[in-house]
Image (spheres, rainbow, N blue to C red):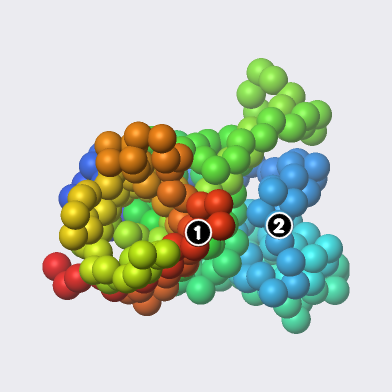
Amino acid sequence: MVQRPVRVVVWGVLCVALIGAPIPAPADEVPYIQTPGNVVDAMLAMAEVGPNDYVVDLGSGDGRIVIAAAKRYHARGLGIDYDRTLIAESRANAVREGVSDRVRFQQQDIFLADFHDATVVTMYLLPEVNLEIRPLILFGLQPGTRVVSHDWDMGDWEPDRRLVVPAPEKIVGLKKESTIYLWVVPARVAGYWRGTLAGPSGEESVVIEFAQRFQHASASVWLRRWSLPGVARLQGDRLALSLDRSPWMPDAPPLRFTLHVAEGRLSGEAVDGGKRYTLRAARLAE
């Protein structure tokens, strides 16, 4: 169960400024509904949980998701729930399943909890709660964090994967099935970058402007002699950038870079036939 605080969250204001998302109206408590066992399995499999992961379940109920992550995948876990009785039940379940050394449970409002070091976040909330928690996920978690939601999406943030699974044990809804959504938190690249582009003809200075919406971005790349438009897609801290050379080289295919984004820098390469191009840039201060 999740207790919703009756307030406007400052992250909601930030979300409006940066990605144009609405601030949802305050909602009632999220009712506790158990996630069927096979749906738990599908959620953890979709997130590709492994022994190095730290799984945080928002509105953790009886603790089944983080317990399953610890028992089957040897991950560490944290369950956060507002209901003190469910927290006590979760701790007892963890002891019974032999994973109390790998998981813990915290009685707290999820909007006040600190889960910034999660590598996987799971949730079965409500649509309006998903929208309000979305800014905390986008701006509070590290790029590459996997987020899995049962049944409810996050508005116009397009999922990276979507899966419908049978759910014969499900006690709500007309259909005995569940929809599972996966998002990978994207790095933030919006703004200006300056660096160098090295290729067969030498190295020259480059300035890049990215306009970003979630995992999608457009790019304008300025070189000495011409500018190139581009499109990009982010998968965590990996950026696939495709530059359109047709305005200047009509027969040339797009130049496709695979870039890594970290600590205000991006770097990577593109290969065009036997020609190799290396791009390096640093973010310019706003």
Q: Amino acid at mark 1?
A: Lys
* Whole-number angstrom distance, CA of label 2 to CA of label 1: 35 Å
Q: Is residue 143 left or right of residue 121?
A: left
Q: Amino acid at mark 2?
A: Glu
User: Along the polypeptide, which appears first: circle 2 or circle 1?
Assistant: 2
> Where is residue 76 shown, x and y percent of the image?
69, 73
Q: Residue furthest left?
A: 286
Q: Quadrant of the C terminus?
A: bottom left
Q: Report which quarter residue 151 is drawn in.
A: top right
Vertical position of residue 88 compared to residue 230: above or below: below
Residue 98 seen in render: yes
Q: Is residue 119 left or right of residue 256?
A: right
Residue 79 seen in render: no
Q: Determine the residue positioned at 56% across, 57% down.
A: 274
Report the residue marked by disc 2: 48
Which mark, residue 275? 1
Q: Report which quarter residue 120 is drawn in.
A: bottom right
Vertical position of residue 127 compared to residue 149: above or below: above
Q: Determine the residue positioned at 27% across, 47% down.
A: 228
Mark 2 or 1: in front is: 1
Helix, strand or loop under label 1:
strand
Is disc 2 in contact with disc 1, using a CB cutoff of under 8 Å? no
Helix, strand or loop under label 2:
loop
> Where is residue 92 shown, x and y percent of the image?
76, 68
Vertical position of residue 87 compared to residue 148: above or below: below
Q: Determine the residue positioned at 22% across, 58% down.
A: 223
